Amino acid sequence: MMQSTILRSTKSLSRHLHRTRSLATSTQPIPTPLHSLHLQLEGTMVSFADYSLPVLYAGENGGVMKEHLWCRSDGKASLFDVSHMGQIRWRGKDRVAFLERVTVGDIAGLKDGMACLSLLTNERGGIIDDTVITNAGDYVYMVVNGATKHGDMEHFREQMEVFGGDVSMEYLEDSMALVALQGPGAAEAVGKVLKGVDLEKMPFMSGVDCELDGVHGCRVTRCGYTGEDGFELAIPADHAITIAEALLSNPAVNPTGLGARDSLRLEAGLCLYGHDIDGDIKPTEAALGWTMGGPGSRRRVEGGFLGAEHILKPDGKFQKVTKKRVGLAGFKAPAREGAEIFDEEGNKVGVVTSGTFSPSLKKPIAMGYVESGLSKPGTEVMLSVRGKMQKAEVTKMPFVDSRYYRVPE
């Protein structure tokens, strides 16, 4: 029952992203470099962001519930195929200035090897996409979402024409696979194929060009979207299966599909583009104002990114917003995307944008948007689920404590 609840949520997500057409022309899902391995591991394949990806696997440790809990278990790590995501290298002496025009983050302030989560915004201050950006020394490495990558790049090309500086964009397309290894045992597992890098001194949100299992031209970033310690490994496509098999030869590593990936990110309180954030939602509405820095930070004071005048006051403070993204808990029947939220007087005050059964907490959780005056944790609201009203409570996120790695002092 619990697994089917999560699986229905993930299939709905898959259908949504299949409808969210990119500029890709193929009507058939695109196989990733790991496709044959997924079939060998008896993955249940679905179309996701125009790619063929596993929603779950068969086997003793397969299924959404088991795959999810494996990722949260001490000493364990989960392997995800995220090759559908867009990998971009930015070069040119004006690359940082350009990226600070199209994203809200302090890219100039990133030390060599360090990364940040940032947002692409439009002229209205809405979120075009979320992205991880790394200062890789002589270039900037960017990863964007698979469902939006072609639209993102068209936006970049348009903005490059307006910008006019020395900047070039190299889309790695399908020449590089991308896999994520997430969980408490991720560092130990990665250490078996990554030599010459002291992982104890590698903080979360940092990256390095490297060899993996003797394969040149790889890149490892300590990041992820589960709330656990983890890594994303960019690998030349021809070597992706070899390295994935080397990682999976470790009994602590389990192949994991889209179903668990979605429930893990929701427990971690993280947004899914097209559901929790989109071009009509501002960073400050989405509780992502921190991506611009704290009060008095350079990006907030100077602005300079697209739509800044719709988000920031001239002094760098945030403009008021009428709705805010919040966590929701304390209800019994799972609330899905689109479920309406009401106050205690019966007035509609918001909508659920993501919802699932939490395998870790053994209860339903959700996130959504409510009127700003009702966004304080502990506020009681009502959810309409299948025509029935049920009580719920606004709660802090993440729902499950994050365990991002910190370098010991």
Image (cartoon, rainbow, N blue to C red):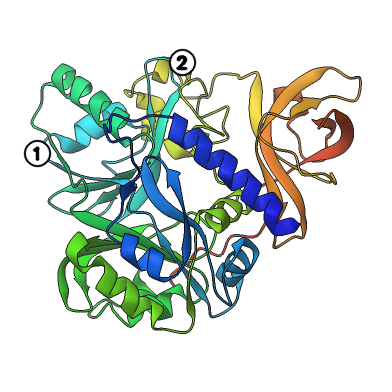
Horizontal arrangement in the rendering, residue 326 relative to residue 363 (left or right): left
Q: Is residue 210 visible?
A: yes
Residue found 24% across the figure and 80% down from its top: 195
**Residue 321 percent across, percent down from the top left:** 61, 20
How would you rate the neighbour count of disc 1 (Cα within 10 Å): few for under 14, some for 14-19, many for 20 or more?
some
Residue nearest the viewer, comparing 241 with 108: 241
Residue nearest the viewer, comparing 311 with 207: 207
The disc label shown at residue 310, or none: 2
Q: How many marks?
A: 2
Vertical side of 331 occupied by 299: above or below: above
Horizontal arrangement in the rendering, residue 150 relative to residue 268 (left or right): left
Q: Secondary structure at mark 1?
A: loop
User: Type of residue at label 1?
Assistant: Gly
Vertical side of 60 occupied by 241: above or below: above
User: Type of residue at label 2?
Assistant: His
The disc label shown at residue 92, or none: 1
Horizontal arrangement in the rendering, residue 71 relative to residue 405 (left or right): right
Image quarter where the N terminus lies is bottom right
Q: Secondary structure at mark 2?
A: helix
**Residue 32 percent across, percent down from the top left:** 30, 54
Residue found 26% across the figure and 76% down from its top: 197
**Residue 205 percent across, percent down from the top left:** 38, 57
**Residue 184 percent across, percent down from the top left:** 52, 73
Q: CA distance from mark 2 to mark 1?
A: 30 Å
Vertical side of 32 occupied by 72: above or below: below
